[in-house]
């Protein structure tokens, strides 16, 4: 079946340098395709290009936009006027500003109806349309200034579907609506689509709305498609780090977690991947060579633009087993931690959490199973003593530090062992990052004279000097009061957001785990059980 809309290598170039790079997709009758991305990603540019709303004087458009086989890019304005509202329509973002304040709703809706219907049918058709979108016939004689934002949005939708077009473009339709109105809009659009069979091109930053309405999603970043796929699969298991960042910043999709935006760029993207400076897994080619949009490994229905094939698995334990004194503590345990994510491991005291963490971090040998670091057998001798490897913050910070060392000696110790040339400068920077002073008074103070909270932060600073790609934190807040615990958790997440490392956190605090982790696992009877979002919500966490 021929698609209602087929976009082929659509590009837009602005004089200021921003460009919508070649974009291709298609939408079938009765289907909804959502386009998501941050502000400035090119969503509005895409809308204007598809609807041919550009002036050739200030933007250069190339490629094809085929509406039922007819290329909108090459047809003249006269033909476009014939097609608008009849074969395609646009519901713009700022509904109230798109209405003529001097005309009643009746007059404005009649302007649409007269394009196709005889005059005698206008009144009945107008009343039916308003009732269909949840307004009343009496609203036809109102002026736009008397409408709420939701009413204006609904009226624009009535205008958009008045002549049963094949395609309706929805530009941020929920931006001015409260959650209740947004839910009502979802139901309305579903019903209209079922009745008319029209296709929707949905432009939105509201991921919950996209999840509820769309069949497929296109992810845009700086004018470039980063990932495409079926909606549920993409939102449940994103393959691109940028997509995961968007999901992690969505309060609607992540109701339990503290929200963190995608980390600011640590350096310019240059000629390579545009997401390079913000990515948590950048590698050599990413800086200089733009990646292609290719099928994701193992998932041909998903396209992802990434030199590494999508989000990489930083650490993976397969079939881990461990016994103590003939008693099985861990049996066939498998766990993976992806780049840039936090995985929380919870369980009762004595369940084996610290044992598993110590095995995964390379401080305790397993009796069975294997451990991989970025797909290769973990070489812990190297990972512990090289920059960009793996570091662990132990539960008992006092026992982890040499009491005869000064704070400065303690924080410099990992760098000295690794023979880093700038370890003292790194140590001072790490102390500041974790909220400790780096002046001579603290630097020269003996570890045995520090408070418990200072020792925990000092242990964290030691780990950070090695710029780890993975941090294992074993009960990092167990000895702290509630206020100090909250501060340390926010510190850990803030550091992770800024530096981009992965984190495996062991805790007995389920509420804290739900706040900081993308995924939560419970260790019981020697095995792991993943707690889904629905299960965490059912536990009453908020």
Image (tube, rainbow, N blue to C red):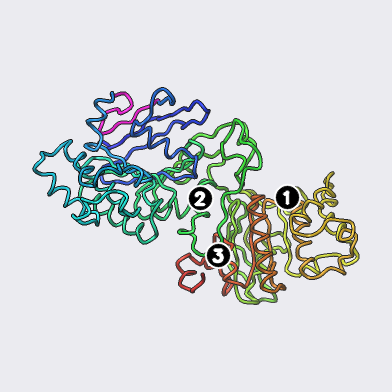
**Side of 462 relative to 506 (left or right):** right
Q: CA distance from mark 2 to mark 3?
A: 20 Å
- Magenta-drawn stretch contains 69: yes
Residue picked out by circle 3: 520
Q: Residue at x 82, y 49 (%)?
A: 418
First reached walking from the N terminus: tag 2 or tag 3:
2
Vertical comparison of 417 with 265: above or below = below
Query: Which label is found at residue 467?
Result: 1
Q: Give how far across and how far down residue 371 sits, in percent.
A: 64, 56
**SS at badge 3:** strand
- Magenta-drawn stretch contains 105: no
Q: CA distance from mark 1 to mark 2?
A: 25 Å
Magenta residues, start to end: 62-75
Q: Residue at x 21, y 37 (%)?
A: 86
User: 10 Å neighbourhood of mark 2: few (<14), some, or many (≥20)?
Assistant: many
Q: CA distance from mark 3 to mark 1?
A: 25 Å
Query: Which label is found at residue 246?
Result: 2
């Amino acid at each position: 079946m021929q698609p209602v809309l087929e976009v082929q290598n659509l590009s837009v170039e602005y004089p200021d340098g921003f460009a919508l790079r070649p974009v291709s997709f298609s939408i079938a009758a009765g289907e909804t395709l959502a386009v998501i991305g941050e502000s400035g990603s090119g969503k509005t540019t895409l809308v204007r290009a598809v609807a041919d709303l550009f002036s050739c004087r200030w933007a250069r458009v190339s490629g094809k936009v085929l509406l039922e086989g007819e290329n909108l890019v090459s047809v003249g304005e006269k033909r476009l006027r014939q097609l608008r509202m009849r074969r395609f329509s646009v519901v713009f973002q700022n509904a109230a500003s798109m209405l003529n304040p001097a005309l009643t709703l009746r007059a404005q809706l009649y302007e649409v109806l007269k394009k196709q219907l005889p005059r005698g049918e206008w009144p009945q058709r107008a009343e039916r349309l308003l009732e269909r979108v949840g307004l009343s016939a009496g609203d036809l004689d109102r002026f736009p200034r008397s409408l709420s934002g939701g009413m204006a949005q609904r009226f624009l939708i009535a205008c958009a579907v008045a002549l049963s077009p094949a395609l309706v473009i929805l530009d941020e339709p929920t931006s001015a609506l409260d959650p209740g109105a947004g839910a009502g809009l979802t139901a309305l659009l579903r019903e209209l689509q079922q009745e008319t069979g029209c296709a929707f091109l949905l432009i939105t930053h509201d991921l919950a709305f996209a999840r509820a309405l769309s069949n497929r999603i296109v992810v845009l970043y700086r004018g470039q498609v980063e990932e495409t796929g079926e909606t549920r699969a993409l939102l449940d298991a994103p393959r691109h780090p940028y997509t995961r960042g968007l999901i992690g910043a969505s309060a609607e999709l992540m109701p339990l977690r503290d929200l963190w935006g995608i980390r600011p760029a640590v350096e310019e993207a240059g000629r390579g991947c545009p997401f390079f400076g913000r990515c948590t897994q950048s590698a050599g080619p990413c800086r200089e060579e733009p990646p292609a949009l290719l099928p994701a490994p193992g998932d041909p229905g998903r396209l992802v633009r990434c030199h590494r094939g999508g989000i990489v698995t930083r650490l993976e334990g397969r079939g881990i087993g461990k016994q103590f004194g003939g008693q099985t503590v861990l049996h066939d345990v498998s766990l993976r931690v992806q780049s840039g994510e936090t995985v929380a491991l919870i369980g009762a005291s004595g369940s084996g959490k610290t044992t598993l963490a110590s095995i995964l971090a390379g401080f305790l040998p397993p009796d069975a199973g294997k451990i991989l670091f970025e797909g290769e057998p973990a070489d812990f001798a190297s990972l512990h003593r090289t920059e960009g490897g793996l570091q662990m913050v132990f539960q008992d910070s006092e026992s982890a530090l040499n009491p005869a060392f000064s704070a400065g000696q303690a924080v410099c110790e990992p760098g000295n062992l690794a023979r880093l040339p700038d370890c003292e400068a790194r140590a001072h920077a790490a102390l500041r990052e974790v909220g400790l002073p780096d002046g001579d008074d603290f630097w020269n103070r003996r570890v045995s004279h520090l408070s418990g909270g200072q020792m925990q932060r000092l242990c964290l600073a030691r780990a950070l000097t090695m710029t780890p790609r993975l941090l294992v934190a074993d009960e990092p807040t167990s000895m702290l009061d509630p206020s100090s615990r909250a501060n340390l958790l926010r510190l850990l997440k803030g550091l992770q957001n800024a530096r981009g490392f992965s984190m495996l956190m062991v805790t007995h605090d389920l509420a804290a785990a739900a706040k900081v982790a993308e995924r939560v696992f419970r260790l019981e009877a020697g095995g792991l059980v993943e707690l889904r979002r629905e299960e965490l919500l059912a536990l009453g966490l908020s």
